[in-house]
């Protein structure tokens, strides 16, 4: 059983800490100009973090206990290809989900 | 564009954020279930989501507390999972830096993977937007993402059962992110950064506290910046 005092301490520290991490640059730097080399790196933050966030989830899905799974791999490839080609997020999600359910139905 | 009212920009944000409801509902319901199983009541569970508003960190904290990990370890581990938020904050600074301190604080509170990813993609496309238009869009994206996060944490805590596994909703997270990543691949530099990010995340997956993702982020950013420089020099040489 989790101790109530510990629980609230963790919740409050995590809340403040998470806010601090989210606010550290927008809050402290604000509208002060950043040097070009930093801006150049920041232009790639999203494409440097999000693919890395997703890759293990695609290759080692929790639902299969971490074993690579053909329907999920196919769905991931279809989604990214559709996103690159059509630049339409909803269409990419629809095609990816169709591939996933279709694959699970055929192979399941 | 003169035709873009702030109302229409807000709704554009709502529309772009809505697909993530597919992720938020099952994920937050599951958090509600897991938290109540660990002994939290409904109020504590929802308060957790309000205060921390970060799925992976919340799951990490509950899991460690249930296993009687020392309090300090619980905090450090869960915050480490959230370190990528500092990268998001840095990346948003050129776009949101001019906002008032209060606006920046609210935007920071609502900075999660989905609001960040949607907004940065849009801000990059719409360089003509004013700071007001950017904030309007950002809060529009947050509207279908953050309130359902609180709401369905509560639903999960009350009903006590997760959404059936047969629906394969575990894969809603990868699919919605991949659908966003596709349109981000605008130049060779973006593709190179993404490629290095995937490789390094897999290679460094063994690191504790989700630190592999941080390594992947830094290496990916360095790759993108270097490729951009190389391509710029090449273009200049061709022009000369």
Image (cartoon, coloured by chain):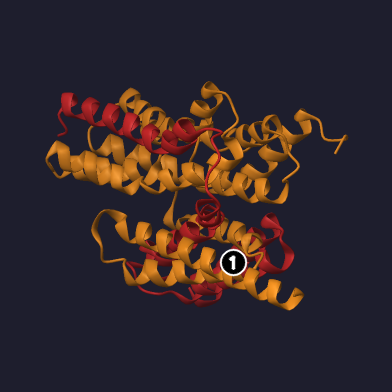
Chain colours: A red, B orange
Residue A17: percent from left, percent from top: 32, 34
Image position of B184 (left or right of B202):
right
Q: Does dot 1 land on a helix, a strand or a loop? A: helix
Residue A52 visible, this orientation: yes
**Front-most of residues B20 and A99:** B20
**Front-most of residues B232 and B206:** B232
Q: Quadrant of the image for the C terminus of chain B?
A: bottom right
Q: Which residue is mark 1?
A: B228
Image position of A59 (left or right of A79):
left
Instruction: Say if B163 sits above or below B36 in the image.
Output: below
Outermost residue, front direction? B240
Residue A78: percent from left, percent from top: 61, 71
Residue B161 visible, this orientation: no
Image position of B134 (left or right of B221):
right
**Front-most of residues B58 and B3:** B3
Question: Based on the displayed image, in which of its 4 quarters is residue B57 positioned?
Answer: top left
Residue A22: percent from left, percent from top: 43, 37
Chain of residue at mark 1: B
Q: Residue at x 46, y 57 (%)?
A: A49
Q: Residue at x 43, y 59 (%)?
A: A53
Instruction: Say if B50 sits above or below B122 in the image.
Output: above
Instruction: Say if B65 sits above or below B46 in the image.
Output: below
Q: Residue at x 35, y 61 (%)?
A: B215
**Front-most of residues A96 and A53:** A53
Question: Label 1: how many residues lie within 10 Å, few (<14), some (14-19) or many (20+)?
Answer: many
């Amino acid at each position: 059983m989790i101790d109530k005092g510990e629980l609230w301490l963790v919740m409050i520290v995590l809340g403040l800490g998470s806010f601090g991490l989210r606010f550290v640059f927008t809050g402290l730097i604000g509208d002060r100009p950043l040097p070009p080399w930093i801006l150049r790196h920041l232009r790639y933050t999203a494409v440097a973090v999000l693919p890395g966030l997703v890759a293990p989830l695609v290759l080692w899905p929790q639902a299969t206990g971490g074993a690579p799974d053909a329907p999920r791999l196919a769905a991931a490839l279809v989604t990214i290809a559709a996103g690159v080609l059509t630049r339409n997020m909803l269409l990419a999600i629809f095609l990816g989900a169709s591939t996933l359910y279709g694959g699970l139905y055929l192979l399941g | 564009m003169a035709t873009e009212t702030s109302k229409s920009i807000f709704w554009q944000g709502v529309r772009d954020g809505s697909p993530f409801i597919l992720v938020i509902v099952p994920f937050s319901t599951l958090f509600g279930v897991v938290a109540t199983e660990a002994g939290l009541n409904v109020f504590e569970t929802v308060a957790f989501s309000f205060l921390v508003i970060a799925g992976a960190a919340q799951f990490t904290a509950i899991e460690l507390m249930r296993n009687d990990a020392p309090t300090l370890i619980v905090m450090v581990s869960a915050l480490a999972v959230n370190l990528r938020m500092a990268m998001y904050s840095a990346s948003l600074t050129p776009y949101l830096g001019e906002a008032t301190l209060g606006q920046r604080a609210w935007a920071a509170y609502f900075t999660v993977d989905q609001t960040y990813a949607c907004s940065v993609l849009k801000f990059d496309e719409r360089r003509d937007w004013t700071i007001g238009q950017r904030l309007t869009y950002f809060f529009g994206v947050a509207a279908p993402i953050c309130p359902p996060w609180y709401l369905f944490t509560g639903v999960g805590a009350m009903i006590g059962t997760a959404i059936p596994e047969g629906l394969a909703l575990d894969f809603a997270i990868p699919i919605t992110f991949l659908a966003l990543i596709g349109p981000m691949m605008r130049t060779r530099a973006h593709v190179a950064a993404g490629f290095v990010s995937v490789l390094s995340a897999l290679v460094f997956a063994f690191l504790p506290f989700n630190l592999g993702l941080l390594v992947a982020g830094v290496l990916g950013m360095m790759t993108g910046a270097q490729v951009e420089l190389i391509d710029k020099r090449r273009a200049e040489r061709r022009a000369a």
